[in-house]
Image (cartoon, rainbow, N blue to C red):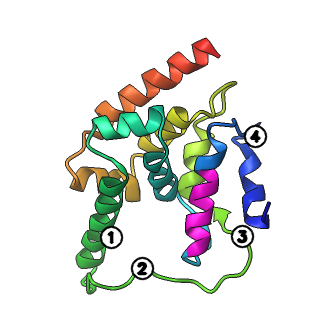
Amino acid sequence: MSDNRSMSHQVAGHATPRDLRPILLDAIDSVQARGGAQVEAADVLRALAAHPGPAADLLAEAGLDAAAVDAALAEERRHSLASLGLRTELPEPRYRRGGRPRWGASAHAAFDRLRQPGGASPVAVLAGILAAELGTVPRALELAGIDRFALLGRATAAANALRRRG
């Protein structure tokens, strides 16, 4: 297993559940492939949408399959650049950083919302991402016309149901 993957073995101080591990590894690998220094909540959201399961199902029900998540995040980037008066066709930044990416502030914040026994499931991570009031993901969902609060409610209910079963 490559060095960049070792950071995925714990989430919020708990061992990473088996169903969450491939999602986090994909987020890490995606960031590393583009030369990024940090895995942010948007990267984890992309990976959640791309992996079949309850989190991807919830996202799809809201109109957010993997392509729609990518489109929403791209639109948020264009909108943010335009609001700063910058050209919106700028390429995605590439970094020449060696080594593995680290968890960024938005991913840490999402994981910090999971500090309960059994809290680190894909739908709980989705709820943690959706609970953010500020940042790339909330702006992207707003621009895409997604009711973040309704989706957060469904993700929270699904995560709580999994905790009761587990």
N-terminal of the pair, mark 3 or mark 1, is: 1
Give the distance between the C-alpha atoms of the residues marked 4 and 2, in whole angstroms: 32 Å
Residue at (47, 40) in percent of width and height: 52
- Whole-percent x, y for residue 116 in the image: 66, 27
Q: Which residue is mark 1?
A: 77
Looking at this view, name the residue that lies furthest to the left.
145
Q: Vertical placement of 61 versus 157: above or below? A: below
In the rendered structure, find residue 100 and report the number of the disc placed on it: 3
N-terminal of the pair, mark 1 or mark 2, is: 1
- Whole-percent x, y for residue 13 in the image: 75, 40
Is 112 on the left or on the right of 124, as rendered?
A: right
Q: Vertical placement of 164 versus 103: above or below? A: above
Q: Which residue is mark 2?
A: 92
Mark 3 touches mark 4? (CB < 8 Å): no
N-terminal of the pair, mark 3 or mark 4, is: 4
Q: Which residue is mark 4?
A: 13
Q: Which residues are magenta?
A: 24-33
N-terminal of the pair, mark 1 or mark 4, is: 4
- How busy is the neighbourhood of tag 4: few (under 14 within 10 Å), some, or many (20 plus)? few
Give the distance between the C-alpha atoms of the residues marked 1 and 4, in whole angstroms: 31 Å
- Whole-percent x, y for residue 153 in the image: 37, 27
Find numbered disc 2 in the image and state the secondary structure of the residue it sits on. Answer: loop
The amino acid on which the numbered mark 1 sits, given as a three-letter code, is Arg
